[in-house]
Image (cartoon, rainbow, N blue to C red):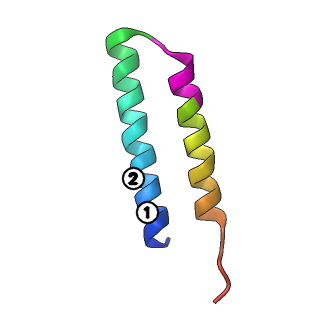
Amino acid sequence: MRAPGKVMALCTMACLVAVTAYTVALGANGWLWFAWVVLGLATAGVLAIRVPR
């Protein structure tokens, strides 16, 4: 895994923790979960890309 992929994966997991904490404290917000899913898909795409050397 390249460094940018690691950073993006770390940010995605941090956002998952934040969205989960928000949901527990204040109730579910569909837009936050939708945004997290989009971020997760973008992260998966970044990790799947293999740049030829």
In which quadrant is the C terminus drawn? Answer: bottom right
| Disc 2 secondary structure class | helix
The quadrant holding residue 7 is bottom left
Q: CA distance from mark 1 to mark 2?
A: 6 Å
Q: Which mark is residue 30?
A: none
Which amino acid lies under the numbered mark 1 shown in the image of this protein?
Lys
16 sits to left or right of 47: left
| Disc 1 secondary structure class | helix
Are discs 1 and 2 less than 8 Å apart at CB? yes
Q: Which residues are magenta?
A: 28-34
- Looking at the picture, does residue 19 appear above or below residue 14? above
Q: Which residue is mark 2?
A: 10
What x and y, as percent, mark residue 50? 65, 74
What x and y, as percent, mark residue 34? 59, 28
Q: Residue at x 61, y 50 (%)?
A: 42
As drawn, the residue found furthest toward the bottom would be 53
The quadrant holding residue 49 is bottom right
- Looking at the picture, does residue 46 appear above or below residue 30? below
- Looking at the picture, does residue 44 appear above or below residue 27? below
Whether residue 32 is in magenta: the answer is: yes
The quadrant holding residue 13 is top left
Q: Residue at x 40, y 25 (%)?
A: 20
Which amino acid lies under the numbered mark 2 shown in the image of this protein?
Leu
Q: Which residue is mark 1?
A: 6
Mark 1 surroundings: few (<14), some (14-19) or many (≥20) residues within 10 A: some
Whether residue 5 is in magenta: the answer is: no
Q: Residue at x 43, y 35 (%)?
A: 16
Mark 2 surroundings: few (<14), some (14-19) or many (≥20) residues within 10 A: few
What x and y, as percent, mark residue 38? 61, 39
